[in-house]
Image (cartoon, grey):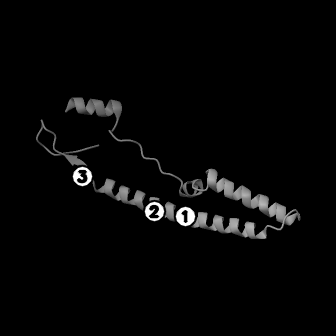
């Protein structure tokens, strides 16, 4: 109808703008937080102490490196799970029917 055309011209389509996230930044954001930063700082401090001869804690440094490796594996698993879930949601969105039957006009129209 004329009212619909006028409102469409004035306000535009009824949909939220979709924003795409940068995949690399999303992956790297999982390494930002209190625990990953604490692991990195502890391993750097231990390495500096071992290199400058103030301590002989190579076993502690190796343990911290192992924790960093486990953190990397955990982050990778979580990232891929969320990425797959996001792809699944995109497929579900695409499968939604863009045509409806309004109550007063009794004809099928496409939703914009």
Looking at the image, residue 95 lies above or below residue 10: below
> How much space separates mark 2 and mark 1, taking CA atoms?
11 Å
Q: Of the two numbered discs 1 and 3 on the same chain, state the one appearing first in sequence.
A: 1
Comparing 50 with 7, the one in front is: 50
Task: Give the side of residue 6 with respect to residue 52, left or right.
Answer: left
Rendered residue at 41%/43% (across/down): 17
Rendered residue at 32%/53% (across/down): 93
Give x and y (percent) for residue 73: 57, 67
The image quadrant of residue 39 is bottom right
Packing grade of label 3 (10 A; few <14, some 14-19, many >=20) is few
Rendered residue at 48%/63% (across/down): 80
Res. 81 mark = 2
Residue named by callout 1: 74
Task: Give the side of residue 110 with respect to residue 90, left or right.
Answer: left
Q: Of the two numbered discs 2 and 1 on the same chain, state the one appearing first in sequence.
A: 1
Assess whether mark 3 and mark 2 are in contact (beta carbons under 8 angstroms): no
Q: Of the two numbered discs 2 and 3 on the same chain, state the one appearing first in sequence.
A: 2
Which tag is nearer the camera, tag 2 or tag 3? 2
Give x and y (percent) for residue 25: 58, 54
Res. 1 mark = none
Residue named by callout 3: 97
Comparing 99 with 46, the one in front is: 46
Rendered residue at 60%/67% (across/down): 70
> How much space separates mark 2 and mark 3, taking CA atoms?
27 Å
Comparing 40 with 11, the one in front is: 40
Q: How many marks?
A: 3
């Amino acid at each position: 109808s004329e009212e619909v055309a006028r409102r469409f011209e004035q306000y535009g389509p009824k949909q939220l703008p979709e924003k795409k996230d940068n995949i690399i930044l999303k992956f790297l954001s999982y390494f930002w937080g209190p625990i990953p930063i604490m692991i990195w700082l502890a391993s750097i401090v231990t390495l500096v102490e071992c290199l400058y001869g103030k301590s002989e804690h190579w076993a502690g440094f190796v343990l911290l490196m192992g924790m960093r490796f486990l953190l990397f594996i955990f982050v990778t698993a979580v990232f891929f799970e969320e990425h797959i879930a996001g792809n699944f949601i995109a497929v579900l969105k695409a499968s939604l029917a863009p045509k409806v039957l309004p109550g007063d006009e009794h004809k099928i129209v496409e939703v914009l």
